[in-house]
Image (cartoon, grey):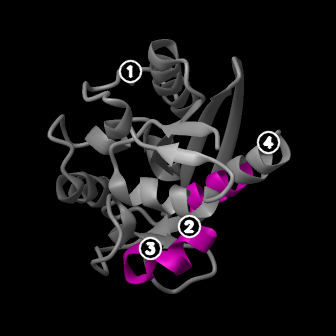
Amino acid sequence: MDKLVFATNNEHKLQEVCDILKGIYQVVGLNEIGITEDIPEDADTLEGNALQKAKYIYDRTGINVFADDTGLEIDALNGEPGVYSARYAGEQKNAADNMKKVLEQLNGITNRKARFRTVISLILNHKEYSFEGTVEGEILESASGNKGFGYDPIFKPEGFNISFAEMNSEQKNQISHRGRAVQKLISFLKNHHA
């Protein structure tokens, strides 16, 4: 079975994708190929970061690879935090601080429309491909729920009355930005598998 590297150290994300691609590809994380250093991601777009991470691994290993980058884009903040979502409140990358900063900036603002966007960059046999998943929603007045990670407690997806952090992972994966991008990646890989 062909090996495919997912350029992540997030065990939760890795397991999710391993389960879905079982029997088609052997998906491995960075730890399994011995890459422990921080991978640069200093592009100014999600697309740029995802591709930068994928290229970094591909250039070092020659193994087919995909990487993702996700951002929360808030209309009233001109699309912020966007590419800076993980470190919006500082380099310590603290989710609680990031949420607090978003809520403070939206204080008194009625337009709370936002979206989560995930971009996946795949390098397969020297060719580059890109897949995107988006989920529209809005920012809540305060955090709600304790599942999920990142901004999940303050994001309410369209058509639901609960935040991402109040959903179980199966529910969230069916509608989430990452879930949607991964589905596109998977159908592509199934069709391009020799």
* Residue located beneath label 2 in the image: 137
The amino acid at mark 1 is Asp
Asked whether, in this view, residue 37 is left or right of residue 33, the answer is: left
Q: Return the disc, 1 or 3, that comes first in the chain's sequence.
A: 1
| Main secondary structure type of the part rendered in magenta | helix
Q: Nearer the viewer, mark 2 or mark 1?
A: 1
* Residue located beneath label 1 in the image: 42
Vertical position of residue 122 compared to residue 138: above or below:
above
Quarter location, residue 152: bottom left
Q: Nearer the viewer, residue 53 or 11?
A: 11
Q: Is residue 67 visible?
A: no
Is residue 175 a member of the stretch shown in magenta?
yes
Q: Residues within 10 Å of mark 3 (few under 14, many from 20)?
A: many
The amino acid at mark 2 is Gly
Q: Nearer the viewer, mark 4 or mark 2?
A: 4
Q: Return the disc, 4 or 2, that comes first in the chain's sequence.
A: 2
The amino acid at mark 3 is Phe
Q: Is residue 129 visible?
A: yes
Q: Return the disc, 2 or 1, that comes first in the chain's sequence.
A: 1
Q: Nearer the viewer, mark 3 or mark 2?
A: 3
* Residue located beneath label 3 in the image: 164
Residue displayed at 57% across by 83% down: 160
* Residue located beneath label 4 in the image: 193
Asked whether, in this view, residue 57 is left or right of residue 132, the answer is: left
Q: Residues within 10 Å of mark 4 (few under 14, many from 20)?
A: few
> Residue 17: percent from the left, percent from the top?
54, 56
Q: Nearer the viewer, residue 46 or 105?
A: 46
Q: Which residues are magenta?
A: 164-184
Q: Return the disc, 1 or 4, that comes first in the chain's sequence.
A: 1
